[in-house]
Amino acid sequence: MMMVSVALLFLLSSPLTCWAFQPTTGMVWNTARIGAVATSTKDAVGTRSRRRSMWTSATTASLVLLQSSLSPTATMAITDKPERVIPETLPVIYVYDHCPFCVRVRMALGLKNVKHALHFMANDDITTPTGLVGKKIAPIMQWDSLVMAESLDIVQHLDQDPRLGPTHSIAPFTGRQDLKIWQNEVQNLLRNLQRPRYVATGLLPEFQQLDGRHAYIRNHALPPYSSEEWKALSLTEQVRKYEECLSRPQHQIKAEIDELNRQLVVLNNLIHSTQHCSEGGISYDDIDLFARLRSITIIKGVEWPENLRSYMNYFSERADIPLYDQMAL
């Protein structure tokens, strides 16, 4: 619990550039300026030791990804991938890594086995998306002269373009209400568990700088705050709420994770198979469901039912989208 708390305080309140961690743990906090400084040589030495440990963990995770599977429990061999498609000009997809709407587009390209370029925007980058589509939004696709926003519109376009392999390979939404009801049931629970962890890992590209982390915190409320109530808080108060959320007593966090585990058992009974959640093959139901479930893998202590874990592993490998197991907090 202490390691999680220190990680959150460090990453929310101190500079982080690329993969190099500044020696700023064991500090005196100044919440008015949202910053920190090391107070002694001992603090700095201890931080270097912790930093070496972080690098070791990151290297181990990278090896896991390179050697075979995209999650520690994935074992299946994917045999149903279509032929590789390499367009003369690669589609460029502007995304945030944590964003489920961005994952929808990445998933469609992965399922069709289309080579593409990923551009991970900083979370505070307003200039890039505004220059492309007139506002801050993600995902955005730029391909030759075409520039598109809105995830499902992009997915539809990709699946109807004959240059990208067989068309209409992804079935429409089935209209299942049980999946929507389940998502609504866990919405607040996941906001509490996921949102602070996104900015606390130090590994997501959109949060590599303090401005990016603060931009996310300013615009993503934690329960029980409404969007309007959250925006009325100062940034200092918002950051403190994120810190408090992840540094709560262990029994409170465990209770939430236990509830999430129970909800995953419910969902496990709703999926049709480990390769598509609804009858009739891969559909927009999967495009939406996997994109939302992926973020749960950033939560340490989650117990995945067997079929649902296989479902996650299948789409992670088939769509070439890594899960977060190796960086879970």
Image (spheres, rainbow, N blue to C red):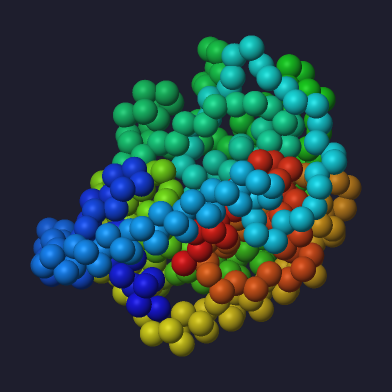
Q: Position of residue 179 (x, y in %)?
A: 71, 61
Q: Residue at x 43, y 84 (%)?
A: 250
292 vs 78, left or right, is: left
Q: Residue at x 31, y 70 (%)?
A: 6
Residue 51 in sight here = yes
Of the pair 305 and 55, the residue shown nearer to us: 55
Of the pair 241 and 44, the residue shown nearer to us: 44
State which quarter of the image contains the N terminus: bottom left
Seen in the picture, residue 167 relative to 247 is either above or below; the reply is: above
142 vs 266, left or right, is: left
Residue 8 in sight here = no
Q: Position of residue 274 (x, y in %)?
A: 81, 57
Q: Position of residue 239 (x, y in %)?
A: 26, 63
Q: Residue at x 53, y 12 (%)?
A: 145
Residue 185 occupies quadrant: bottom right
Q: Residue at x 64, y 12 (%)?
A: 88
Of the pair 156 and 14, the residue shown nearer to us: 14
Q: Residue furthest right?
A: 280
Residue 55 occupies quadrant: bottom left
Residue 305 occupies quadrant: bottom right
